[in-house]
Amino acid sequence: MGGEVRSSVVALAAAVILTVATVAAAAPDFAGLQIQPYEPPKAAPAFSLPGLDGTPQTLESLRGKVVMLFFWATW
């Protein structure tokens, strides 16, 4: 029975090594990717949109608040 356990451990170790080697070989070459450097965010231009009650809402009136714009359309 000791031989079976040893064989199982060796097979498991081989499978782990093979898996790690395969994953490492399949990983993308990040140095070869043409990734643009991060640029600091730019301020949004001034604009206004109608609110739910029809009154214009300006971005300036929301300064200091979290603003999420969600443009959705159905065709």
Image (cartoon, rainbow, N blue to C red):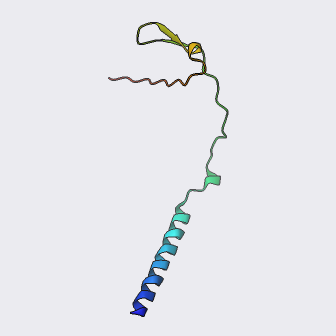
Q: Which residue is drawn at 67% across and 40% down?
A: 37
| Vertical relation: 36 (above or below) 16 | above
Q: Which residue is drawn at 42% across and 92% down?
A: 2
Q: Where is residue 61 in the image (x, y as percent from the top left)?
A: 57, 13
Q: Which residue is drawn at 60% across and 56% down?
A: 29
Query: How many numbered tags mark residues here?
Result: 0
Residue 64: quadrant of the picture:
top right
Q: Where is residue 32 in the image (x, y as percent from the top left)?
A: 63, 53
- Quadrant, the N terminus: bottom left
Q: In the orientation shown, which residue stands out farthest toward the top?
A: 55
| Vertical relation: 38 (above or below) 11 | above
Q: Residue at x 44, y 12 (%)?
A: 51
Front residue of this view, candidates 13 and 21 = 13
| Vertical relation: 47 (above or below) 21 | above
Q: In the orientation shown, which residue stands out farthest toward the left?
A: 75
Left or right position of 23 against 54: right
- Quadrant, the C terminus: top left
Q: Position of residue 13 (x, y in %)?
A: 49, 78
Front residue of this view, candidates 36 and 14 = 14
| Vertical relation: 26 (above or below) 35 | below
